[in-house]
Amino acid sequence: MPFRPLPPGCAFWQPSTLLATVGGIGLIRVASGTWGSLAALPLAWLLWWLGGPAAVAIAGVAIGLVGVWAAGAVCRGGEPDSSAIVIDEVAGQLLALAPVAGVPWLYPLAFGVFRLLDIAKPWPISWLDRELGGGWGVMMDDIAAGAVTAAVCAAVLAGGLA
């Protein structure tokens, strides 16, 4: 079966489930977090085109706040951080891309560094993942990974390496 089951107590058409899984992307069985991050790339480009880096950053924060609610509702189904929840990857990836969203050739760097930090979870990202509960716990490690990635990408851009 190519799709993972929903966490207990969740129905696909519930608004919290639709948001947390980003319309079902999180139900892809293999590499759902990577698919969630990939979904943010065209969104970042569109947001940058409409409003520049601030629009990308603001969207990342807004999606992060909505994600706290959506992920928290899905977590109440019994799984503390279901792999089906990918709204955290979208929010974190948008933050990661904010300083370089108008520079498409830096997207692979932002994508790669963000995925590496999200998977490896070095300190303090691991602390956030471990110590915070519910929707905040699901979201904040990815927000932190996005912020660190944004700093790396901004440094690369500022250093003239792009």
Image (spheres, grey):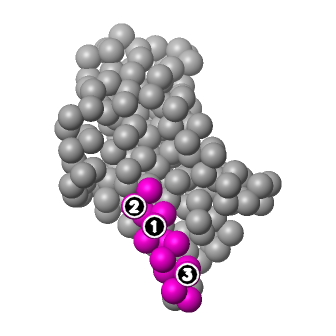
Question: Magenta segment, which residues?
Answer: 147-160
Residue 80 or residue 17, whichever sits in front: 80
Residue 54 or residue 81, whichever sits in front: 54
Q: CA distance from mark 2 to mark 3?
A: 15 Å
Residue at image point 44% right, 55% down: 146
Per the image, the residue denoted by label 1 is: 151
Determine which of the numbered discs, if any, sits on residue 76 in the image.
Answer: none
Q: Work out which quarter of the rendered image holds the N terminus and state it.
A: top left
Per the image, the residue denoted by label 2 is: 148
Can residue 66 be seen here? The reply is yes
Q: Position of residue 39 (x, y in %)?
A: 55, 50
Q: Is residue 25 left or right of residue 117?
A: right
Q: CA distance from mark 2 to mark 1?
A: 5 Å
Q: Work out which quarter of the rendered image holds the C terminus and state it.
A: bottom right
Q: Position of residue 9 (x, y in %)?
A: 36, 10
Per the image, the residue denoted by label 3 is: 158
The reply to whether discs 2 and 1 touch (Cβ–Cβ < 8 Å) is yes
Q: Is residue 149 left or right of residue 60?
A: left
Amino acid tagged 2? Val
Q: Position of residue 133 (x, y in %)?
A: 27, 27
Q: Is residue 117 left or right of residue 97?
A: left
